[in-house]
Image: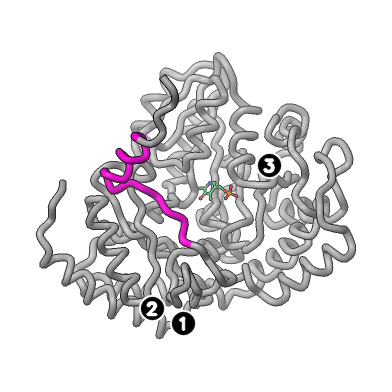
Amino acid sequence: MPFDLASGLAERRAAHLYRQRPLLEAPQQPEVTVDGERLLAFCSNDYLGLASHPEVIRAMQQGAERWGVGGGASHLVMGHSTPHHQLEEALAEFTGRPRALLFSTGYMANLAAVTALVGQGDTVLEDRLNHASLLDAGLLSGARFSRYLHNDANSLASRLEKATGNTLVVTDGVFSMDGDLADLPTLCVTARSRNAWVMVDDAHGFGPLGKTGGGIVEHFGLGMDDVQVLVGTLGKAFGTAGAFIAGSDDLIETLIQFARPYIYTTSQPPAVACATLKSLELLRTENWRRDHLNRLIERFRQGAARIGLTLMDSPTPIQPILVGSSERALQLSADLRACGILVGAIRPPTVPAGSARLRVTFSASHSEAQVERLLDILAECWNRLAEEPGTDA
Ligand SMILES: *Cc1c(COP(=O)(O)O)cnc(C)c1O
């Protein structure tokens, strides 16, 4: 039998799970052109509005002039250039850890950390709502892999009792599809009582959270004794691309020696590192971006409550509206789009069955007036959706 791809695709379509890629015909900013339509977007992860910042653009241009375009080789061969090294030093200082290691994507950083730290005979325990890259990393590692109930230290503790070998507890800092925070103070105490290490992927916390944008560990005041492996990504609030892992000297050396997703890949273009050095500076120092973002989030949550929307327990720029069925989530997303608002519908398997949602995200580059417009249109579309008979579970 040849591959029957067509029937797999047809099934996905019939289940309202078919994915399409909106074509963005503008830089990252609130008002964009997508598939030829002018839309107000609430679905970017550019939380601080740095992706199109003129100074960040300039830093990348100057970086390209000085360092060329391609990374040229892997870090261990001849691709580790001065901007990469300077960025690693700046990220170590920013996170208050001895060292940081730069990666081309967050997906690779997660694969690298988990597979370098645990293998056969070891144990990796993950929150069941962790990002796909962390779950994939756990499977790839060959370690005993088990998922604990979301944010549940008791569920973690019972799995820790059965753990063998080196044990790594892995969690998102901010859960990417829910926007809630990991209960890190409790999880870290639980892990430490069994000599397990904690790895936090704070892709969505760096930038919005913490006094200087230092993410969930800054928010909770946690050091390297609590979180031994700290991962950040640079494609979200930093507005550029890539990722980093921060931790002890031994951790970073272990990754350089043993992490295959670090070793067997070309370094990121050095000009991207130049851009990130600039965006790191803006992220740390321009507190008004966080303040403004928090005002927008607060205003949205008040307004959404008035409309009767079901939000999640999120203090972050990720503010999902729970809808339930994939069909209704798609309908609401389409209704909003017809009114000029772009918000993505997130469906299974990205989120658990029956919990399809619209993932609204805010950026410091949104204005208060734009949030008001979102609320007005949401009220209209939500009421219309409520009048339509539901056709599926
Ligand atoms: C986006 C994301 C990643 C992947 O990072 P990329 O740099 O986009 O590959 C990893 N973890 C979490 C929690 C994310 O949200």
Give the CA separation, mark 2 to mark 1: 7 Å
Closer-to-camera residue (35/249): 35
Give the CA separation, mark 2 to mark 3: 38 Å
Q: Would you identify the image quadrant in which residue 315 lies?
A: bottom left
Going from N to C along the chain, the mark reached first, 2 or 3, is: 3
| Percent coordinates x, y for residue 151 in the rendering | 38, 42
Give the CA separation, mark 3 to mark 1: 37 Å
In this view, 197 is above or below 286? above
Q: Residue at x 56, y 69 (%)?
A: 28
Q: Amino acid at mark 2?
A: Val
Residue 390 visible:
yes
Q: Amino acid at mark 3?
A: Gly
Q: Is residue 286 left or right of residue 335?
A: right
Foreground mark, 2 or 3, reads 2
Using a 10 Å C-alpha cutoff, classify the residue at mark 1 as few (fewer than 14 neighbours), some (14 to 19) or many (20 or more): some
Q: Is residue 172 magenta?
A: no
Per the image, the residue denoted by label 2 is 371
Q: How is the image coloured?
A: one colour
Per the image, the residue denoted by label 1 is 367
Q: Residue at x 50, y 63 (%)?
A: 23
Closer-to-camera residue (317/31): 31
Q: Residue at x 56, y 38 (%)?
A: 199
Residue 314 visible:
no
Per the rendered image, the range of residues in magenta is 7-22
Going from N to C along the chain, the mark reached first, 3 or 1, is: 3
Closer-to-camera residue (167/129): 129
In this view, 222 is above or below 335? above
User: Which quadrant, please, contains the N terminus?
Assistant: top left
Closer-to-camera residue (322/114): 322
Per the image, the residue denoted by label 3 is 247
In this view, 246 is above or below 166? below
Mark 3 beta carbon near ligand 1 (under 8 Å)? no
